[in-house]
Image (cartoon, rainbow, N blue to C red):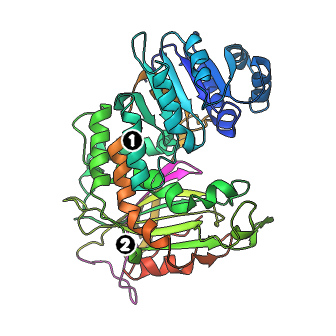
Amino acid sequence: MRKAPVAPPATFVIFGALGDLTRRLLVPALLNLTRGGLLAEQTTVLGVSHHDKDDAALRSELDDFIEADDAWATLRERIHYLKGDFTDAATFEALAERIDGNAVFYLATAPSFFGPIVDSLADAGLLEEKKGFRRVVIEKPFGTDLASAKALNARLLARAAETQFYRIDHFLGKETVQNILVARFANVHLEAVWNNRYVDHVEITAAETVDVGTRGKFYDATGALRDMVPNHLFQLLALVGMEPPNSFEAEAVRSERAKLIAAIRRIEPADAVRGRYEAGKIGDKEITAYRKTPEVAPKSKTETYVALKVQVESWRWSGVPFYLRTGKAMRARDTQIIIHFRDAPLKLFREEGVDELPPNRLVLQLQPHEGIKLDFVAKQPGPLIDTVPVSMDFVYADHFPVSHQTGYETLLYDVLIGDQMLFQRADQIEAGWRAVQPLLDAWASDGEPEPYDPGSDGPASADALIARDGRRWNPIA
């Protein structure tokens, strides 16, 4: 097994150093890279925030989210703090004095700061790559619709090159997500049937049991569609549907993903449903109705669930529907991709009273238990030829030591080594928003989300959406 090289040293600057993203995900991910011997000893972390703190206070705040060991003791001493306002030029002048060489600027901030911070970095000369690389990592949401995404891209690309921007989607850091590419392009028997001749439809689900909780203000301005579809779900769709790249280099892979997303037909309201959870229980946990959540408008029309029928206009996928769904306060935490294959052309093994055999399916389980399952039909033991559905399961944890990872380790390492394969390009971002813009326009002024019970599989209209094509969702479990 090849060992990844140590990433080059850099100053890792985090804007929003005292936020949950930094404490729960980013610094623990950097610590895991340190434990794995992938972070250079000279790499330092510089947290920037407006709070009245110092190095010791920031380190103390991070201690509560870290399992202390020798690696943490080493990294902890290399974590520093800079107090500053993100809108004040003096902050960036002070930052410039503390950076010499490679630098990564991670924008763990509200989206409203993305443009101003990049402008200020450029004005202070911090994006000039004279003494080393200068890279900017931007979290979602990247825009709120097509117009805002195009405006933000134009603003950023006026100040630095596309190669300097890393639009991050933590879904793409998961091992099984990356394994989609390996499963497809390293196994000829799979790629041979990965097309509209053999695939009936594809189902992509990202279900969460958690409700909106304390994120009412953010979520009410965002909703399930903006939060999950143009980024997470479309990225999964792109990995499933993209054409084989001519190499495994970043731009070759990103170009094929971009082509797939650009081929998504604009989604009309007739091919989408939205829902909103009501009050209820999931297990022993009481769930407050979405509209009763703090900082959510009492008459909010924001959806917490969305289901879509997506068509990809390409030679490979013409006529194959992709059914996407995502929601909060649902039955189980379950993220999976299911490839449903067509029936055998000649049904030799009909049983009395049963005209259809169970379908062949390939299940790519992304969370909570990462793995791959193949559902097929076998003969049941006995003198008669009776069929029975069976499965072959591959579970990552059964074959590899799956350590406690945040999902950001691979992505942060790739930023440091300059590999953009798992990050979105400007054209991908805009194509995703273009596909859902008809829904944003229609839902802005028309109708209400359909209510659904917490702990369910979502609203009844989602079942009707797929049932009209003679299909049904796989149960969330």
Please give the range of residues in magenta: 346-373
Q: Is residue 110 visible?
A: yes
Can you identify the residue that label 2 sits on? 268
State which tag comes first along the sequence, 1 or 2. Answer: 1
> Callout 2, which amino acid?
Glu
The quadrant holding residue 332 is: bottom right
Magenta segment: does it hold 268?
no
466 displayed left or right of 77: left
State the image coordinates of residue 265 (x, y, percent, origin top left): 30, 64
| Magenta: main secondary structure | loop
- Residue 19 percent location from the top left of the image: 69, 37
Answer whether labels 1 and 2 touch (C-beta < 8 Å). no
**54 to 381, vertically: above or below:** above
In the rendered image, which quarter contains the N terminus?
Answer: top left
Q: Is residue 368 magenta?
A: yes
The residue indicated by pointer 1 is 153
The reply, left or right, for residue 201 in relation to residue 465 is: left
In this rendering, the answer to whether 395 lies above or below 57 is below
Which residue is more in the foreground, 163 or 33? 163
Q: Position of residue 200 (x, y in %)?
A: 31, 69
* Mark 2 closeness class: few <14, some 14–19, many ≥20 residues within 10 Å: some
User: Circle 2 — which element?
Assistant: loop
Residue at 51% x, 48% y: name it: 141
Instruction: Answer with the quarter of the image where residue 129 lies.
Output: top left
Residue at 21% over, 37% down? 246
